[in-house]
């Protein structure tokens, strides 16, 4: 009989138990402190909230929405962003410490509005363009840019406004006395300085090319309105008092008599152009001479054949040979404006 050997294996299992305190969070001196077992703790500290930056700013007005060199107020509204730093520090029971993380936290704490006065940047080529851009702008000096910047006077009220002044002259000093087709600039770029102003011929021609209407008045109801193509009438003609042209006027008034769509003989030269001839200032009308000088029209058209002013009065002239002080242009304080639109 064979002996059986029995191997008895004894297995002893042992378990290792780790004991730790339960995790908990508490607040110490306003800081969040998290305890993790017995070996270490993590502490989060915060800096004070402080202004960091302005963000998401929006402005309610921009320079291109306002005419060149005119003042406007721009309001800029921004979010106020505050920030603080959160730092997590791990502190071991043996005294060692280490920074686990640093985080920047942000919040919006309100809005700030800043108002500033700025200048517009929009430019047009004529006063009519300015009026079309902003119909509420008043009469005054403006910069236009038909080919380069120039300072002009814009009449924004007379007969619908939008007129660019090309010549201004005063009765008190006898006027400029030069035909409009001559190059005779006076105070160019300063339209309201002194008693006289006139653009150079090249600048008048430039404005003429950009407009369709012309107006002559002496700042009252007396006026002439025609096409701007008539500005240089008489150019190339005789340089004396007989230089005249029949002009079609869409609107004309003298001493309360108003006409529309009427043709009247108009003289083109001035005293300077007809030296020694006794010529009145350029662009004037003699109601008693409409049938002569090659005009072939009826005299005294203002009042249907009845004289309106003193005989042979050079109406609308400033350099007056024959005047009638009851008309706007012949009053002692008269200023004649020639404008294009």
Image (tube, rainbow, N blue to C red):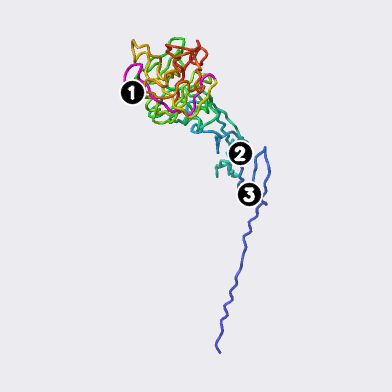
Give the foreground label among 3 and 2.
2
238 with respect to 313 (left or right): left
Q: Position of residue 242 (x, y in %)?
A: 35, 18
Q: Position of residue 252 (x, y in %)?
A: 49, 24
Say whether marks 1 and 2 touch (CB < 8 Å). no
CA gap, disc 1 to disc 3? 103 Å
The dot on residue 257 is none
Mark closer to the chain start, 3 or 2: 3
Residue occupied by mark 3: 36
Neighbor class of circle 2 (other Cα within 10 Å; few <14, some 14-19, many 20+) is: some
Task: Specify whether residue 176 is painted magenta.
Answer: no
Label 3's element? strand
Label 2's element? strand
CA gap, disc 1 to disc 2? 72 Å
Task: Specify whether residue 238 is painted magenta.
Answer: yes
CA gap, disc 3 to disc 2? 34 Å
For the question of whether residue 288 can be seen, the reply is: yes
Q: Quadrant of residue 231?
A: top left
Image: magenta residue range? 234-255
Residue occupied by mark 1: 235
Q: Position of residue 137 (x, y in %)?
A: 53, 27
Residue drawn at (52%, 22%), measured in percent from left and top? 303
Q: Nearer the viewer, residue 229 or 31?
A: 229
Quadrant containing the N terminus is bottom right
Give the foreground label among 1 and 2.
1
Label 1's element? loop
Mark closer to the chain start, 1 or 3: 3
Q: Position of residue 12 (x, y in %)?
A: 61, 68
Give the foreground label among 1 and 3.
1
Residue occupied by mark 2: 108
């Amino acid at each position: 009989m064979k002996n059986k050997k029995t191997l008895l294996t004894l297995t002893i299992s042992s378990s290792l138990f780790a004991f730790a305190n339960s995790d908990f969070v508490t607040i110490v001196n306003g800081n969040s402190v998290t305890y993790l077992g017995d070996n270490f703790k993590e502490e989060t500290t915060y800096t004070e909230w402080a202004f960091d930056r302005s963000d998401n700013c929006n402005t309610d007005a921009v320079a291109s929405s306002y005419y060149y060199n005119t003042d406007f107020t721009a309001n800029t509204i921004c979010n106020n962003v505050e920030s603080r730093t959160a730092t997590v520090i791990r502190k071991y029971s043996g005294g060692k410490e280490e920074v686990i993380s640093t985080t920047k936290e942000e919040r919006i704490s309100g809005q700030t509005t800043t108002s500033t006065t700025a200048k517009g940047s929009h430019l047009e080529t004529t006063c009519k363009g300015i009026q079309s851009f902003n119909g509420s702008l008043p009469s005054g000096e403006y910069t236009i840019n038909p080919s380069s910047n120039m300072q002009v006077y814009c009449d924004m009220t007379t007969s619908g406004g939008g007129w660019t002044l090309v010549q201004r002259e005063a009765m008190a000093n006898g006027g400029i006395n030069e035909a409009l087709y001559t190059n005779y600039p006076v105070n160019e770029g300063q339209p309201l300085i002194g008693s006289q102003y006139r653009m150079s011929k090249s600048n008048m021609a430039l404005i003429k090319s950009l407009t369709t209407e012309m107006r002559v008045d002496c700042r009252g109801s007396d006026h002439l309105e025609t096409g701007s193509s008539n500005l240089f009438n008489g150019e190339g003609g005789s340089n004396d008092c007989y230089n005249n042209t029949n002009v079609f006027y869409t609107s004309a008034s003298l001493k309360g008599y108003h006409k529309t769509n009427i043709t009247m003989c108009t003289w083109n030269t001035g005293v300077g152009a007809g030296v020694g001839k006794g010529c009145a200032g350029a662009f004037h009308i003699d109601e008693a001479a409409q049938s002569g000088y090659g005009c072939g029209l009826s005299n005294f058209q203002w009042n249907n054949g009845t004289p309106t002013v003193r005989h042979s009065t050079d109406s609308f002239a400033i350099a007056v040979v024959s005047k009638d002080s009851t008309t706007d242009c012949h009053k002692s304080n008269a200023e004649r404006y020639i404008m294009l639109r």
